[in-house]
Amino acid sequence: MTADLIRWRGGPGAGKSTTLIEFCRAEVSAGAAIGDISVMTFSRAQASDLARRLHELVFLDADPKTISRMCGTIHACALRQCMAAGLIEDPREQVITVTSRRKAPIYEEFMAGHGLAFDPTIGAEDDAPSRADLPVGNQVIALAAYLTATMRQPDEWRVAATALGLAAQPQIWPFSYYITAWRDYKAKNGLFEHEDYIRLALVHRLPPPASILVVDEYQDVSPAQDALIRSWIEHPETKRVYVAGDPDQSIYGFRGCNPRLFLAINAEDRGATGPSSRPVSHRCPVSVMAAAESILNRPANVSPCIRRGQVHHVQPPDADALARQVEEAIRYARTLPGERQPVFVLSRYQKTGQALARALSAAGVPCSSIKPGRVRFWSRVRIGRDRAHLETTTVSPWTLKQAITRYLAGSSAIDPAPVPTIEAETMILATLTDAKRTDALAALRRLKSKREPVRLGDVYAWTGGHLRDGIFDALNLRPWIVREIRACLTLEQRRGYEIPPDMVKIDTIHAAKGLEAAVVLLHTGFQKKRLDDLTDPDRLAEERRVFYVGATRASHALLLLDYGETPVCPFLRGVGA
Ligand SMILES: Nc1ncnc2c1ncn2[C@@H]1O[C@H](COP(=O)(O)OP(=O)(O)OP(=O)(O)O)[C@@H](O)[C@H]1O
């Protein structure tokens, strides 16, 4: 038996995720319980966004953890099914990813055993100047994942390697030998990469995670994921399936994903089923949509909302000007309705994003990333004045900045103003060492255990008196960290309000897929060595879709940002000028 299957199509902001949430609500009204529904999407960020929205709109009284469990990536759902079937017992040990530092020795052991060059810092992002320039070991790992995701037979491997841009180094053949060796190595050691347990679930015909399946961002499923979901659609326990997607937002071709799979499902169609049935975008205003369509080079599956919106091309010449640009974006976002309006700074490449984060931080604007851990500076740094004396203990520079603001505002050495414990602790860790630190932390713990408030006067007493500006010299941190905290305080004083790190999210366009921000600064840079890729029509189409996804994250203003040395992507020239 095949379950009822509804497919909802629509361009950016057409309400695909919202419609899926409405389908969930209808299922609940018809008697479904949380455990009867499984919501799947592409990335963890999207899964947590969906969980938040389901909590706000459908499962108001449910435990957030229960809702989080019902929402996950397709990978996470497959993994859970493999664990339930006893096929994977200990995912912490058995699931490996190339970017995990903890798992790097596993990859290194295999590479060393085969004499392959390998760089464990290179991840699965589509970031390298050219795939053919990657160390051979990294090419093997990328190709192995691609072959599993695309379910290629060995006689198709060579063609697949060419499609992935890996064939420029014929001297590294035979690829097939290394691919087989890597698969054998994982099988022998009971290890699984993400694509492997999708295949495992498929091979073992594992049952679906729930009887009602909801899949968002279907345009980015790989052939293996598509096959798994189809097997779940056909499973006798499955009652209904809702899928949503937009072929114009398919941006993971380099991992074997294919938008045609979404259109090939035999489903009842809703949403944008033809040129006359374009839904209205609830996100993208007229000017943003016009810019986005010129990037895509054809009409979108959605028409703009009635807002005019703003599109500009900006070219800040240095980090200070970049910081002013971001501050202006935040000032504008703060005028919009809604409590918190984040600003996204999005780039095609992770390296560019990191350079932008460094430049902004140095100029005094705190920032974070969409994917956890990519921009860590404002959440965690190690204590110590130089590299040779770094401790393993860390402090949050953002909490420290808040503590110093309070510290500098104190009127006297016995100021009774209360101080949050976390700030007091951060000040102690960042300024004191050895016995003085131990004593101060013990005093802080005593106050906590007696439930007495910590006073500013206590902090002055523990940290060597009311040093005023001298507190910066007392910080046991590397000088560049102290400089960035000072720069942040200077900007705050000038503008009169704080910009917390989560107000400025810097990441790749890929990481922002499915999400939205009031203002998007879209970096226009394109790797010089990959400009030739754009002569291939399929690659050009995918690159256009990538920047289209970036541009359409903006609900109010899109700023095309030229910054740094990388050449401007050719099809962005003139957009927003
Ligand atoms: N019917 C509606 N009325 C008002 N606002 C809506 C409606 N549907 C969606 N929205 C709002 O529009 C925005 C985009 O909605 P949603 O995320 O569902 O779009 P999407 O099609 O999934 O977008 P994307 O293509 O980027 O994944 C959200 O802020 C959402 O709250």
Image (cartoon, rainbow, N blue to C red):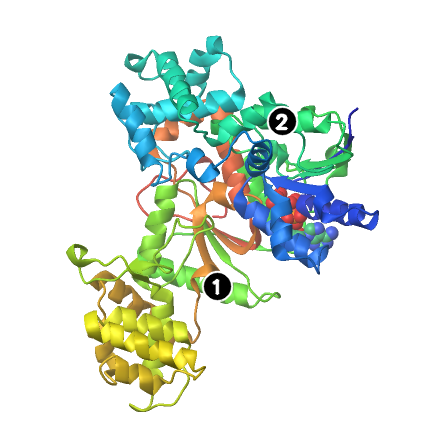
> Quarter holding the N terminus?
top right
Relative to residue 333, is residue 536 depicted above or below? above
Q: Position of residue 468 (x, y in %)?
A: 25, 83
Residue 335 in picture, x, y percent from top left = 56, 68
On screen, residue 400 above or below 86: below
Callout count: 2
> Relative to the observer, which residue lies in front, 236 or 530?
236
Instruction: Measure the C-alpha gap from mark 2 to mark 1.
Output: 43 Å
Secondary structure under tag 2 reads helix
- Left or right of 192? Residue 549 is right
What residue occupies the far right of the structure in this picture? 30
> Does label 1 point to a residue whose CB lies under 8 Å from ligand 1?
no
Task: Determine which residue is flagged by label 1.
Answer: 330
Q: Residues within 10 Å of mark 1 (few under 14, many from 20)?
A: some
| Residue type highlighted by circle 2 | Leu
Going from N to C along the chain, the mark reached first, 2 or 1, is: 2
Let me know if residue 265 appears in the view: yes
Q: Quadrant of residue 279?
A: top right
Residue 286 visible in the shown view:
no
| Label of residue 228 in the image | 2
Q: Amino acid at mark 1?
A: Ile
Residue at 82% x, 50% y is 29
Of 7 and 246, which appears nearest the observer?
A: 7
